[in-house]
Amino acid sequence: MPGLDADAIDRVVEQIAFNDAGLVPAVAQQHDSGEVLMLAWMNAAALRETLTSGQVCYWSRSRRSLWRKGETSGNRQRLVELRFDCDRDALLLLVEQSGPACHTDRRSCFYHAVRDGDVRIVLEPSEAVS
Amino acid sequence: MPGLDADAIDRVVEQIAFNDAGLVPAVAQQHDSGEVLMLAWMNAAALRETLTSGQVCYWSRSRRSLWRKGETSGNRQRLVELRFDCDRDALLLLVEQSGPACHTDRRSCFYHAVRDGDVRIVLEPSEAVS
């Protein structure tokens, strides 16, 4: 993610349709393997910080504060490319994920699957996505 | 997606943490290529119908009705596998997408990218994802 100047960042942020709570859902995808790692939320400040630093920063709805992904765990997400959708109300973050994305120590948060008529855990901690 | 009986579907739906509006975000990903196609929303009825029919059905927030993806366009999404995340408040749909997923006739809705200091269109109508 090459650095953007402040005006360019403002032009990007202005295009996003944040919801009534000032948030937009952001899907993080490992840029080379295509793994979908997690879905979290950003407000304008989190998006602005992400574009400024190149390290993904979300908005924590539970803590009501900026959530600099990996700040304590070291499992950071480096932004490779930001994309957004036709309605401008969803973000796709192509990232380089360091370590597991999930707080359960799994590579991806999407480890529950409906298989064989029931919900199965298809990803164990510290494994690659099946 | 093998058929689930009504009890199994209820057990899945009961595990999902729908938001205050009764909705959950759902990310559709092409099951074999890994392309992220779109993000839309489901309520319990849409999720139940999707698991019953094996064809993806969303909830249209603008029309306030079930949205059987591809019902008019023919660009259906066959559900290959349903996954959900650690917090149970986001769905990942592994799908077989027929034709373009986006109403703009693009394969994916995520066709805006921040590149070279500006927003670029990186996917043209009826093209594969770059």
Image (tube, coloured by chain):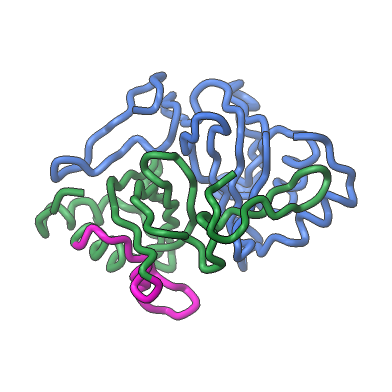
Chain colours: A blue, B green
Q: Position of residue B40 (x, y in %)?
A: 46, 61
Nearest to the observer: residue A92 or residue B124: B124
Q: Residue at x 41, y 28 (%)?
A: A104
Left or right, B10 with reference to B117: left
Q: Residue at x 13, y 53 (%)?
A: B4
Q: How many marks?
A: 0
Q: Position of residue B77 (x, y in %)?
A: 34, 58
Question: Farthest residue toward the front?
Answer: B127
Q: Residue at x 44, y 24 (%)?
A: A105
Left or right, A7 with reference to B67: right
Q: Position of residue A9 (x, y in %)?
A: 82, 49
Left or right, B113 with reference to A85: right
Q: Residue at x 49, y 24 (%)?
A: A100
Nearest to the observer: residue A69 or residue A128: A128
Q: Position of residue B101 (x, y in %)?
A: 46, 60
Q: Is residue B65 above or below residue B55?
A: below
Left or right, B35 with reference to A47: left
Check if residue B70 falls in the magenta segment.
Answer: yes
Residue bounds of the magenta highlight: B53-73
Check if residue A29 falls in the magenta segment.
Answer: no
For the C terminus of chain B, the quadrant is top right
Nearest to the observer: residue A115 or residue B87: A115
Nearest to the observer: residue B126 or residue A29: B126
Quadrant location of residue B10? bottom left
